[in-house]
Amino acid sequence: MSSTAMQPRGGYLDRPHSSSLADVLNVILDKGLVIDAYVRVSLVGIEILTIDARIVIASVDTYLRFAEATNRLDLAQQGGKGLPDMIGDMSEGGSHGKTKGVIGGVKDALVGDRDKDDGDKEEARPSRRRRDEG
Amino acid sequence: MENPSEISTNLYVYGVVPAEAEIPRLTGLRGEEIVTVPSEAHAALVSPLPDPETIGTPDDLMAHSSVLDQIAATAPVLPMVFGTVVPNAETLTDEVLDPQYGLYEENLRRIGDAAQFSLQARFVRDAVLAELINEEPEIASLREAIYGTSEDETRNERIRLGELIVQGLQRKAADEAPRIRSALEPLARETVEREASQAEDVLDLAVLVERPRQAEFEQTAEALAQEGAGRITFRLIGPQAPYDFTGEV
C-alpha cells in the first residue's frame, strides 16, 4: 500500500515524490543505528559528513541578509505601505542567495577536503562511539 | 537474489528488517542490488561495497536514503547510520545481528506498523517581513534608516534590524507552532521536533504515523497548508524510514 499513490494532491502542500539532497541532509544525516567500531570497516572520508551543514540563525550574516531583504521589500505588493522610489526588485531577494548558500554549504561538507579533515577525525569519532550499541 | 554467504567483500549495511519481511528488488549504492543477510529474527539489508574508501558522496547518501525509504513505504525498517560498512556477512550476523537482537526487537516494537513523515512549516519571508514592519516601529524606522545606503554605511543599523527581525520571526513561530502540532499529534504515534535550520522555520517535525492513518495525516497537512497559504508554506516528505525514532532507548 502506498499512501502517496492514493492521496489526491490539493496543491497547497509541497509534497515531493522523493527527497532532495537538502531534505536528506536535514532529515537523516547522522541518524540511525550505530554498530560497534571494532566491527565496522573504518572509513577515511565518512567523518566529513558529521560536519554540521546548517546555517547559523543567530549570526551577523543572517541579520545582514534580513536587513537587505527589508530594503528590497515592496510593501505595496505585500498589502502594506511602500517606501517612496521603491524598486520591486524581488528576483534578487535574499531567499535566492540563501538557497544557494545552503546547498553550497552542504556540498562543501559532502565533498569536503579529506586532507584537512584528518585533523578533525579524532574529534569527530567520539560522538559516534558514545552512540555505539552494546 | 544471490546468496549473501557467497559475498566475501565488504558490505554496506542500510538497515534491519524483521526476518519475514518481503524485500522488493532494489538497487543501492553504486548501482548494486540489495540483498538480505538473515539472522534468526531479523535480516540486514546490504549491498556489496568493494571500495569503501571512496564512500561519502551525495550520490551515496541519496542511495542510502532511497533504499530505506522505499522499504519503509510498505514495511518496518530500522535505518543504520549512513556509512555503516562491515567486512563480510559472517561478521554482520555474529557480531551485529545476533548480539543486538534485543535492541532491534525493542526498536521494531517502537515503530510498529508506522513510517516516518517529515513536515517543515516555514514562513513566507516577505509576507512576514511586511507584518513585522507594520507591527514594530523600531523595525520600520531602521528599515527607513538603511534605505538607499550601502552595507558599509549602515552596518550597525542593519545588524540591529536583522536581529529584531530574527527575534520577531522566532516569536511568530512560537505563536504558530503549537496550533500545527496539535492538529497533527492526534494522528501520530510519536513526534520529534527538530531544531530550526533557518530563521523562517516555524516548525520542523518528524512524525511517526501508522499506515492506516497516513491518508488522514496527509489530508490534515494539506488543510494546514491551505490555511497558511501565502504566509506559511508546508513541505511534507515521506513515508520515510524512522530515522528520528530509531536508536538506543
Image (spheres, coloured by chain):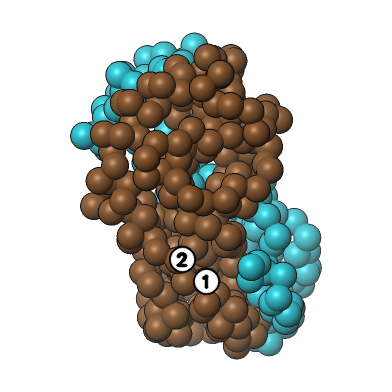
Chain colours: A cyan, B brown
For the N terminus of chain A, the image quarter is bottom right
In the rendered image, residue B141, in percent from the top left (x then y), is placed at 51, 74
Mark 1 and mark 2 in contact? Answer it, CB < 8 Å: yes
Query: Residue shown at 59%/15% (left/top)?
Result: B50
Q: Which of B126 and B45 lies nearest the eye of the viewer?
A: B45
Parent chain of label 1: B
In the rendered image, residue A13, in percent from the top left (x then y), is placed at 66, 75
How many C-alpha atoms fall within 10 Å of the one at disc 1: few (<14), some, or many (≥20)?
many
Q: Is residue A62 visible?
A: no
For the C terminus of chain A, the image quarter is top left
Total marks shown come to 2
Judge from the rendering whether residue A132 lies leftward or rightward of residue A117; answer left or right.
Answer: left
- Identify which amino acid the numbered label 2 is placed on: Ala
Q: Which of A31 and A104 lies nearest the eye of the viewer?
A: A31
In the rendered image, residue B221, in percent from the top left (x then y), is placed at 57, 79
Residue B101 vertical placement versus B131 (above, below): above
In the rendered image, residue B243, in percent from the top left (x then y), is placed at 44, 51
Query: Residue shown at 33%/26% (left/top)?
Result: B94
Q: CA distance from mark 1 to mark 2?
A: 5 Å
Q: Which of B109 and A17 lies nearest the eye of the viewer?
A: B109
Same subunit, tags 1 and 2: yes
Instruction: Give the residue at mark 2.
Output: B114
Instruction: Give the residue at mark 1.
Output: B211
